Structure formats: structure tokens, C-alpha cells
Image: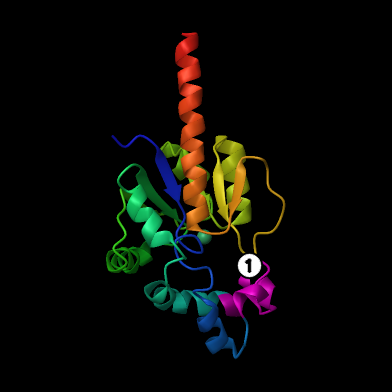
Amino acid sequence: MKEKRFGIDIDGTVTCPSSLVPFLNDAFSLNITLQDIKKYDLAEALNISPDKMRDWFDKTEPAIYAASPLAKGAGEVLAKWQKSFHLLFISARRQHLLEVTEKWFQEQQLYFDHLELIGSHNKVEAAKRHAVDVFFEDKHDNAVMLAEELKIPVVLFNTPYNQETVPDNVIRVENWYEANLWVKNWLKTNEADFFTEAEKA
Ligand SMILES: [Mg+2]
């Protein structure tokens, strides 16, 4: 039986965080790599006017999402997890991008129990509504907010743009293999706690 419920961000978490780099290079005649993106806000990170960046992003978003490669290990680990856990994808993408998003999941052969595009970065409400036990994120302030307000562990995928300090229940990992190891240990600890509680009763 699937018991644990995993809330999972899409961009920069399931997709490779460098997915938009070739698009940025092309549009703004740059020659950057992911290492040059030290802030989540792209306008700020690349010193481009926010209006210009927003216009470009609105126009280019569907193409980026259609072409995004999977993050290292994501396909393998998620295929394994789908047998044991509820996989609830909760993304800040907007509703009009649902079709391109679903098509991409199909192409990548990624299974989901639920897919929700909330159109904003406030994931606390959605994660609460879905009774998420653990969240997987790449955006620093989201990770901290989810961890603090819901008192759940949040696994934060390490990137150049999320290096600020984090509370104890935000766990940094380098990739999906590390996330998988963390989950294994977390389950063991949970089970141990459960039996201790049962013995006390
Ligand atoms: Mg993200």
C-alpha cells in the first residue's frame, strides 16, 4: 500500500536546472553556464531588465518545457518510487502550460498520482491540502517556507542559485540518487519511531 505522500517540484528538480541556459544564451547573445546563475531571479542574476526577461520568458516557456532534459537520476529514481509512494507534482507553472507539461511527462515515461500547476510560488497551501509528508524542491525560499510552516522535511536539490542557509529539516542533496538514499534512511527512522511508540502504548 502506498502510504507516504511526496510533493515534488518540476523545474530545476525533475528537469535539469540548466534546461533554460541554451535558450537564454540564444535570446540574449550570452555565453553562460548554470554556474553563472547565482540567483533564482533570472533578471537579477543576468542583469537584464525585469520587463524584458518577463516578456522573453512568457514567449519561450512552452519551448523550454517541451525540450527540458530530465535531471540526473530522476527518471530512474521516480520510476522506483512510483511503486511505493504517492507522487504529487506541484509546480509554479501556470495553467495554460498543463498540456505541454502532461505531454512531457508522457514522453519521459514519468508516472504521476497528481499533477498541479498552481501558477504561483506559494506551495504551502497545495502541499497542506495534499497532506504531503516530504517535499522535493530547488527554490531556496520555497524549501524554507514549506519546511517551517508545515514542519516536514524538504529535500533541496543543490544548485548555484540556492546556496543560502537552511533550517535543519531542509536536506541538501546533489542529485536524485542522494535523494533516494535520504528517503531510505528517513523511512527506517520513521519505522523505528513507530515501533517505539507502539511499545509504549
Ligand atoms: Mg523549481
In the rendered image, the vertical position of residue 2 relative to residue 118, given as above or below = above
In the rendered image, the vertical position of residue 192 relative to residue 47, given as above or below = above
Whether residue 96 sits left or right of residue 182 in the image: it is left
In the rendered structure, which amino acid carries the disc numbered 1?
A: Asp
In the rendered image, the vertical position of residue 106 relative to residue 83, given as above or below = below
Residue 22, percent across and down? 52, 83
Badge 1 local density, few (<14 within 10 Å), some, or many (20+)? few
- Residue at horizontal 49 percent and vertical 68 percent from the top: 16
- Residue at horizontal 51 percent and vertical 31 percent from the top: 189
In the rendered image, the vertical position of residue 142 relative to residue 200, given as above or below = below
User: Looking at the rendering, in which quadrant would you find the N terminus?
Assistant: top left
Q: For mark 1, what is the residue?
A: 41
Q: Is residue 47 magenta?
A: yes
Residue 187, percent across and down? 46, 35
Q: Is residue 134 magenta?
A: no
Pick out the residue farthest to the bottom: 29
Whether residue 167 sits left or right of residue 190 in the image: it is right
Residue 133, percent across and down? 46, 37
| Span of residues in magenta | 33-53
Task: Indicate how the structure is coloured in the image.
Answer: rainbow
- Residue at horizontal 65 percent and vertical 66 percent from the top: 160
Residue 163, percent across and down? 69, 59
- Residue at horizontal 47 percent and vertical 74 percent from the top: 58
Toward the viewer: 80 or 7? 80
